Image (cartoon, rainbow, N blue to C red):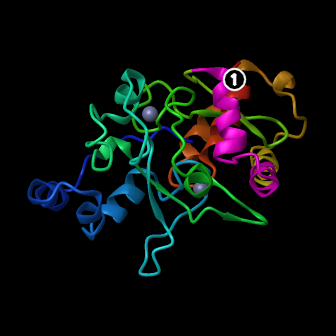
Amino acid sequence: MLRIASAGMPGDAVARIKTEATFESLKAVASVRPALAKEQGHRCAYCEQRIIVDEKVTTRIEHFHPQHGTDIKSHCSIQAGASALADAPIEWSNLLLCCDGKVVGDETCDVKKRNTDVCDGIRNPKTAPPDVDTLVEVEIDGRVSPRAPIDVTRAQDYLDNVLNLNHPTLVRNRLRLMNELRKQVGIKAPSPGAWSAQQKAKIATALRSSVGDREYGSVYLALARRYER
Ligand SMILES: [Zn+2]
Ligand SMILES: [Zn+2]
């Protein structure tokens, strides 16, 4: 769950919802999915797997605050950028692009989340403070725990049970990448203890600058943080 620096709704989509302010009409604007994908580095907003916008339409437009059923409370309004439930379906900062949610024997991300309101636990990657680069900490075993949560207990529950981000497949993918990166930067021991401050800073900078559009960006950041301590 990397922080997303939003580029704003494309102009033709803005024009479209001026005439018809519904999610259905917004969704039909061809530029919407590519714009969301681009600002997210072509990664699922939740699990950070690569997502590709194509004619097969396997990506899903997710509402951080659900578009149906749940009242907008004050914390929702801050997180979703929508002041009323009627705005939630079309508010750009409430829209995230997600993967197809298919994972071995289970579901993840917005498919698993359905209409659960998570605003009281985790932060919306799109409205999180600029100094929070990711909303998850990738642990040494590949699992994720909350970073900068609204409420740490709820956040962990949402990561585990609502978004299913600790599904064994995702954990394994993160772990594999973490091990690969360790090899690449020449880290043999799991502990950064053996390195000089200068060497550690160099490794951390290299990791941070490698995130770009790569899958599982939070793995790079988690590893970088270990060398920044
Ligand atoms: Zn996903
Ligand atoms: Zn909410």
Residue 201 in sight in this render: no
Kindly identify which residue carries mark 1: 153
Residue at the outermost front position: 69
Magenta stretch: residue 167 in it?
yes
Q: Is residue 190 above or below residue 41?
A: above
Residue at the outermost right position: 189
The one of 21 and 172 positioned closer to us in this rendering: 21
Disc 1 marks which amino acid? Thr
At 67% from the left and 39% from the top, the residue drawn is 159
Q: In the image, which residues are magenta?
A: 151-175
Q: Main secondary structure of the magenta part?
A: helix
Residue 20 lies, in percent from the top left, at 14, 59
At 24% from the left and 68% from the top, the residue drawn is 29
The one of 131 and 223 positioned closer to us in this rendering: 131
Residue 58 lies, in percent from the top left, at 51, 72
Magenta stretch: residue 99 in it?
no
Residue 133 lies, in percent from the top left, at 52, 32
Q: Is residue 228 above or below residue 203?
A: above
**Taking the image as four quarters, which one is ligand 1 found in?**
bottom right
Give the SS element for disc 1: helix
At 35% from the left and 64% from the top, the residue drawn is 34
